[in-house]
Image: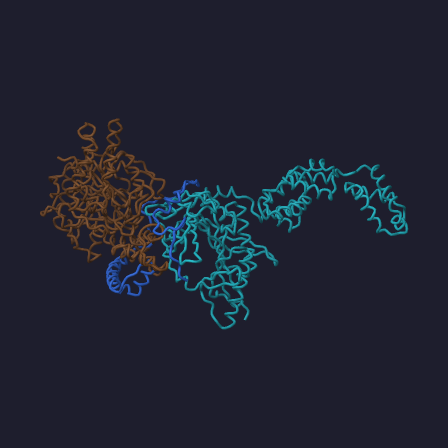
Chain colours: A cyan, B blue, C brown
Amino acid sequence: MEYEPVIGLEVHAQMLTYSKIFCGCSTTFGEGPNSQTCPVCQGMPGVLPVLNKKVVEFAMKMSLATSCRINPECVFARKNYFYPDLPKGYQISQYALPLAEFGYVDIELNGGNKRIGITRIHMEEDAGKLVHDEHNPSSYVDLNRTGVPLIEIVSEPDIRSAEEAAAYLRRIHEILVYLEVCDGNMEQGSFRCDANVSLRPRGAEAFGIRAELKNMNSFRNVQRALEYEIKRQQYVLEGGGEVVQETRLWDDTQGVTHSMRGKEEAHDYRYFPDPDLVPIQVSDAWIDEIRRTLPELPLEKRERFLREYGIPAYDAGVLTASRALADYYEAVVKLSGKPKAASNWVMGDILRFLNEDRRDIRDCPISAESLAEMIVLIEDGTISGKIAKEVSEEMYRSGKPPRVVIEEKGLVQITDEGALEKTIETVMAANPAQLEQFRSGKDKVFGFFVGQVMKATQGKANPQLVNDLLKKMLPGT
Amino acid sequence: MKITKDEVAHVAHLARLEFDVEETEKFTSQLNDILLYMEKLNEADTTGMEPMTHAIAQKNAFREDAVLPSLPIREALSNAPDPKGEFFRVPKVIE
Amino acid sequence: MELCERTIHELQQIIRDGGASSTDIVASVFRRIDAVEKNVHAYIMLLREEAFREASKADEEIRKGNIRSLTGIPIALKDIYCTQGIPTTCGSRILQNFVAPYDATIVRKLREAGAVFTGKTNMDEFAMGSSTETSWFGVTKNPWDLDRIPGGSSGGSAAAVAADMCIASLGSDTGGSIRQPAALCGVVGLKPTYGRVSRFGLVAFASSLDQIGPFTKDVEDCAIMLNAIAGYDPRESTSVPVDVPDYRQFLGRDIRGWKVGIPKEYFIEGIDPEVETLVRQAAKVAEGLGAEIVPVSLPHTQYCVAVYYIIAPAEASSNLARYDGVKYGYRSTEGRDLLEMYKKSRSEGFGAEVKRRIMIGTYVLSAGYYDAYYKKASQVRALIRRDFDEAFQTCDVILTPTTPTPAFRIGEKTGDPLQMYLSDVFTISTNLAGIPGIAVPCGYTAAGLPVGVQFLAGHFQEGKLLQFASAYEAGADFQKRRPNF
């Protein structure tokens, strides 16, 4: 029998606020254990939560950017369970009435576009961290992360392959980062993903029994874990077995998923509205206010780049991968007036330099102004494209503007016909054999002469001019 | 019977409590009396009534996104029954 | 008359007149404590040294002419508010060594008003009880009859005021925990509107019902205390930004023409005849003062106890999940793994009543029962509130008994939780609706036990309540007594 995977994803994204969701502790990552806690996030007796307004606004941004409907009123609920990283014995989350519902994103696949539904987006607090002792039967609790604001984005079970799942995740990630509501760092856990996977006979309506996958901390791992899990379930079903409803952990080193059996009991979270927090009412005016702050989203930007700059779709995709890169590119276009050349330079040398150094575009030593100036210098013939490569390298190394680099290195293009004619004469005299070959009809040798002239001028000769002069000066064929 | 001894044991586990046989017997009987008394509520007509979860009708209580000082680490751990270094130590989770 | 027997407003006059210092007053209070505390056991912890230190600071301020609303006045705190650097036990073994690193908002406010803290008073464990018998630190006795309970859960605070072991005290009221012990100990007890006094730093029992209020010797002191503690607190989301009037302005005014609602549902079978007689007598007094008695109906009153004993335990089961032996509080040494540690710490750390309520609360929220219990109760709660809204369309205040009986005997109801729960029958509705209520002494039974009448008003109508209570107190036709030791 042929099976079809049914996948739904739950993304947890950390909101980029300065302080925690219900108290004033800092959200900075990587500080000493338990150094960022207070009575509120430690869940001490008597404390009460007060909601950070920024969290609501960030969550609203994401909801609008994914075409969700923001509920006029939403409430926080308590999710009750015991774990040492959960100091209150409950997590403040949203349950019956989430912030937003009924959204979607479009993903691009080889076969075209596909729309993936978003069931809901809600706000909640993160839990702390548990460090396990390898030598003793103890664990250590660090509550710094407790109360860091999260939004959970739950997709509809619309995803049908590991590849689609990865495309969906990239889209969600891209939007979050574009909105500047999440830093998107998967290694530090600012962007996490769990997946629900089941298989059903192709054509069937009903869903199969699903497993929940956790512990996949990169796009690649999500895809690998899903591929593995789909195969595993297929194997179980084909063998006449039944998939067990359970949580499975992805093991990156072994490339398999393991059952968490035993560790997890049948959960009964006893959700109920948190009496310590009041409902959040979102007016149309507030929604409009937030909508006005939304930046152009990646997909819109991509389409505009295609339309306005006439660059290939692939280039538009690369250039809009981050808001900062797209802004950089647009600044170069604006200053140089050359969208295609700008695209070639940004996608080529600039990204290569940055990748080699694992640097972000925001830290690029070549400013948009400098790159635009260099493009203009190529266009007006001051330097050749070849020289420009050398110039850009030096610009990247030293951060100096192109004119300074060109001047310091004496790289201005030779466009003086008289001087070039002299050089050509010298080259012709020094290579009588090749000259004879050319005369006897070997056109290929033409290139040899171009090369020699460029070499003699240390590459500074205007190549077009060299071509023209050589055609004129070499003996006719 | 509204609640059985097994259910009492299950609820106790959810609440991370444990009772011996005698206590379980007593709790089961007391919980039964109490739950039986709660049956009274079925007589109340609540058609169309929104559940009331707050005593007052406040909405939208927010704070600004401003960082305030955290507790010094020594104070953060001062009540811990078993602190270890800068951590709260707990017995291992049995898998 | 000993200084400790005086009211706040009397002492303020004495201080201003130079008749006594704060140190004199504190000394008088501690002399009384030394004499009677061993019999009453109102306190979990005394703050003797701190009190004398604060008193001499207060005297310094008084000399400078810097007298604030409670400067130098000895106040007792229920051991349910977090006090920085001083243990806060909530009457529980599980918190017996807990020292909060912060002050509750009301503690801060009282400090700012110049109050001197005498100690932290005994209470039912986590405020769960109606008799102060469930405290890990022992039973508090009723100063009027040491074989009887003082009421609960704020029994220590009520007994301390009644026995002059402080001038006024603070309690918390989730289902009657201020008004019921006030009535049974013959003092004034006010539960303000939900959201009127900050809950920040009040160890939570049932968050949607808990409210802090004072115990005082008379209504004027009650207004003074409310002035000191009321007000919006940005650290509490359910705090309400409503202006705080000077509540003393409502004292001594007449109540001519006021409509006093008497709900028939509060004069039911099972109410002690002496209590009923004294409460009806109180209504007569109001009538004599020019008020009009009108019948009102609160038809859903019969459901209050059931609603309360679903909602309060549900919230409590979640609020008390934090006591897990990880960050603070009692940890059993026997747990070999995490699950055992949790279960043993909690089972050894909590007393029977707390465990019973955690069990009820966990059950009513659990899968399959939520709608039948928690949701249903929350819907009926809305009906109860609507009853009050409608009643207050036709009357200014409502007058009811505070308790169905005078103080019962120690141990009388501990074996039957449901009977104990039913003793809250007249006080619970106030918390469910979020409205203010005050218990004021209205006489004594033949056996000499005090009885309290309860007045209720609409949301944020504390001024009205105090005006009515003060008029009643002035016009009441019985001689005030003191407990005899």
Q: Nearer the viewer, residue C8 or C182?
A: C8
Determine the residue located farthest toward the left in the rendered image. C446
Q: Position of residue A447 (x, y in %)?
A: 82, 48
Q: Position of residue C364 (x, y in %)?
A: 31, 58
Q: Residue at 16% across / 35% down in the picture?
A: C3
Q: Residue at 21% across / 28% down in the picture?
A: C16
Q: Nearer the viewer, residue C190 or A454?
A: A454
- Is C285 situated above or below B92? above
Q: Quadrant of the C terminus of chain C?
A: top left
Q: Is residue B89 left or right of residue C42?
A: right
Q: Position of residue A399 (x, y in %)?
A: 64, 39
| Residue C64 in sight in this render | yes
Q: Residue at 79% across / 38% down in the picture?
A: A415
Q: Position of residue A416 (x, y in %)?
A: 81, 36
Determine the residue located farthest toward the front in the rendered image. A135
| Residue C396 in sight in this render | no
Q: Is residue A14 left or right of residue C102?
A: right
Q: Residue at 84% across / 48% down in the picture?
A: A446
Q: Quadrant of the N terminus of chain C?
A: top left
User: Count of labels shown?
Assistant: 0
Q: Nearer the viewer, residue C84 or A7?
A: C84
